[in-house]
Image (cartoon, rainbow, N blue to C red):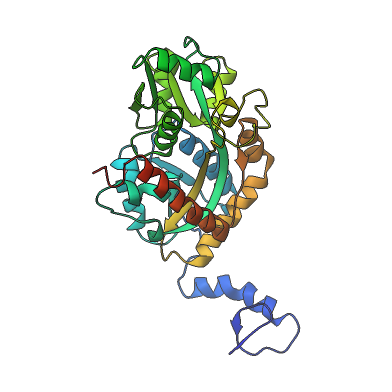
Amino acid sequence: MQKSDCGLRTWSLSWPGACIAFVALAPAVAIAQGIAPYPSKPIRVVVPQPPGGTTDAVARLFGQRMGEILGQQIVIDNRAGGGVAGVATQSLVANGNPDGYTILAITPNFTFIPYLVKKVQVQPDDFAPVTLLSRDPYLVSVYPGVAARSVKEFIALAKSKPNSLNMGSGNIGAGTHLISMLLLTEAGIRKEVTYIPYKGTGLAFNDLIAGRLQASVTSIVSGGPHVRAGRLRALGVTSAERSAEWPNVPTIAEQGLPGFEAIAWYGFAVARNTPVSVVNTLSAAAATAARGGDVSGRIRALGGEAVGSTPDEFSKLIARERPRFRALIQDLGMTGSLE
């Protein structure tokens, strides 16, 4: 055997196009050996949040299009709860069969769970990153009855009426929880505002729209529609620059907190040791979906950006995020604070 021009180990074949012919025969050889081509059955995407939140929405949007591209149905399996930040749900996927038929939908909390919980059950290294699906800034919004039309006014209101305002979003350990605490800390109102955890942002919106909750930090993709409909009022975005789709909503940094920046992201990962060919197949399908107008257009209209990255690009993002969140958790005094 020798390495051919196409980068595969092949028997020595001297005629033109031999490499192409060999690759073309690969599926037939696999079938003859009893190895089913991937995917040969429906794929499950496990979402550690209930329906209605951003992670669920992005997973469904990409899942539907990727299923069409791959020729197999992609089923969304919502698993609310699962312990702190869905650790039990992550373990379910990490310890499952590494065959690519069970995918985990992940968000920034995937990178900081090991620093947050006392007994670590799962690490990012237990997974193979597949693709970064999309990214978007967080949105700070309030119930329209709250007497604040900017972040500055909200801070002033909180200081003038301590303990009268509640802010809520994801559960303890979720990305929205940490970003909320970061905002309250840098604004100097961490003791004046009470944080209310929810099992998913969809549940938080129910109380926010009803006025039982006064403020929330959520993805702009999930909060944007409520702002456009007049059910909520936007105070600011957490990105370094204003969103192209929301040019009238100022950044947090513009409103007295210079340097404040945080980005939400959503991706897919599979169990470690999943065949590279399977990971690449899923990644390629996500990239194709991200370039399509039906996916990218819908996410862009809400203020987000469809990405569809390669596994290597996504791995590098995760590697950058881990030390950043570790420092944040240490600063908040939350290292190993959760069971």
Residue 279 percent location from the top left of the image: 51, 61
Quadrant including the N terminus: bottom right
Residue 195 falls in image quadrant? top left
Tell me what residue is drawn at x 48 percent, y 56 percent. Answer: 319
> Could you tell me which residue is drawn at 42 percent across and 50 percent down?
111
Q: Quadrant of residue 260?
A: top right
State the quadrant of the C terminus. top left
Q: Please say whether residue 46 is visible from this viewpoint.
A: no
Residue sitting farthest toward the right: 16
Query: Is 328 or 134 nearer to us in this picture?
Result: 328
* Vertical arrangement, residue 318 with respect to residue 85, above or below: below
- The residue drawn where x is 33% and y is 17% is 163
Position in image of residue 234 (x %, y %): 55, 21
Number of marks in the rendered image: 0
Residue 333: x percent and y percent? 32, 41
What residue is drawn where x is 68% and y is 26%? 247
Task: Tell me: residue 132, above or below residue 158.
Answer: below
Residue 13 position in % (x across, y down): 67, 88
- The answer to whether residue 335 is seen in the rendering is yes
- Along the viewing direction, whichever of 160 and 45 lies nearer the viewer: 160
Observer-nearest residue: 63 or 37? 63
Q: Is residue 4 above or below residue 172?
A: below
- Name above or below for residue 85 compared with residue 120: above
